[in-house]
Image (cartoon, helix red, strand yellow):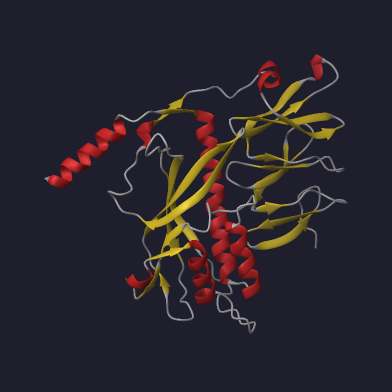
Amino acid sequence: MRLVIIFMLTLNTVWCQEKRTVNKSEVEAIKSQVRVKMGSLLELYNNLLTSTSDEREQFIKNQTLFTFEARAFLDDDVVIENDFAINDIELPENANKKVKVYLSDLAENYGEKDNGERPNEGKRITFSSLNLSQLQLPTPQDSLNIKAYFTTNYAGKATNGFLFKQAERVAIFQIDRVKNKWKVYIKAINFYKRYSDYDYSRNVVIKEDNIKLSIQDTYSAHEYKIVCMNPILKAFIWGGFYGLLSDGSNDNERKILIQPALLEIGSFSDEGLALICQDTGEWGYINYEGKVVIPCQYVRAKPFLKGKATVQLGMELFSIDVNGKRIK
């Protein structure tokens, strides 16, 4: 009975807290970034499985270093609830570890030996059942939070006999607004617990908005970056997403080529192609008209140079031509 009273008081306190208003397009921008960060986390796991000790050190550093734009974790003090197990029995002496210790243990126990052996060749970690919570605001003083629920799957054994514990996990993200962009970082990774992971989304009011913009809307309110000089094309930001604007010499030539729905639009190359990143985190290429001419399917991609570009599909790196065909 006492636990029920405490729980109800907690709900009442949360219900009475100040609410924060966020536009619907901003919510989608935040969730897109969370998915990208989860992709970075998965890539990190798999890099640690097949890397040398020097490479592992750099991988870990890049994910935690404060000044590194692509880092996945909030800082070095992020705690991960350890998912190593032997015969599905948790190891209580290793219950919680700071991110660098956890990743270092993962690399040492599961990664490539420095003598060149590859015990994990052909094996990959996967995330299944990836679902995102509503936006959450535990208290008015906190940053916004969002939770990603997932399961880590890996069939192999570590060199010391450890296995990954197959259980639903939750990555808790901290969300802060920096100028006109949202920044999201992992602040903890735990096993999912029904009561402690209660959804506090009622503290955030999602305001409906219309992201289909007119030229006047675009020019009056938003930042740009010039991505092409001839023709003059500008990438603009609305609610955390990029759109593409054609800025001709007269009003008849001015038009929005792409409504704001992309995570990134790069500069156009001499080949007349620009990199774009969809909200799924996949990369492709557009032409001057804003049309996708090489599908968004790559986990990584570089701009075209001298008729070719380097892309990554799954774990495979290769080059493509301007038609998207693989160069042998």
Percent across and percent down for residue 245 are 74, 27
**Viewed as shown, does residue 166 lie left or right of 3?**
right
Say if residue 90 shows up in the picture: no
The residue closer to the viewer here, 217 or 72, is 72
Q: Residue furthest front?
A: 141
Percent across and percent down for residue 21 are 45, 27
**Viewed as shown, does residue 145 lie left or right of 307?**
left
Q: Residue at x 74, y 21 (%)?
A: 255
The residue closer to the viewer here, 135 or 104, is 104
Q: Is residue 283 placed above or below 160 in the rendered structure?
A: above
**Viewed as shown, does residue 28 lie left or right of 166?**
right
Q: Residue at x 74, y 41 (%)?
A: 266
The total of numbered circles placed on residues is 0
In the picture, residue 117 is in which quadrant?
Answer: bottom right
In the picture, residue 25 is in which quadrant?
Answer: top right
Percent across and percent down for residue 193 are 31, 53
Q: Residue at x 87, y 31 (%)?
A: 230
In the picture, residue 113 is in which quadrant?
Answer: bottom right
Q: Is residue 242 placed above or below 297 in the rendered structure?
A: above
Question: If the image is split into quadrants, where does the C terminus sit?
Answer: bottom right
**Viewed as shown, does residue 270 lie left or right of 277?**
right
Say if residue 100 shows up in the picture: yes
Percent across and percent down for residue 37 are 55, 50
Q: Residue furthest bottom?
A: 115
The residue closer to the viewer here, 118 or 223, is 223
Q: Is residue 304 placed above or below 242 in the rendered structure?
A: below
Question: If the image is split into quadrants, where does the N terminus sit?
Answer: top left
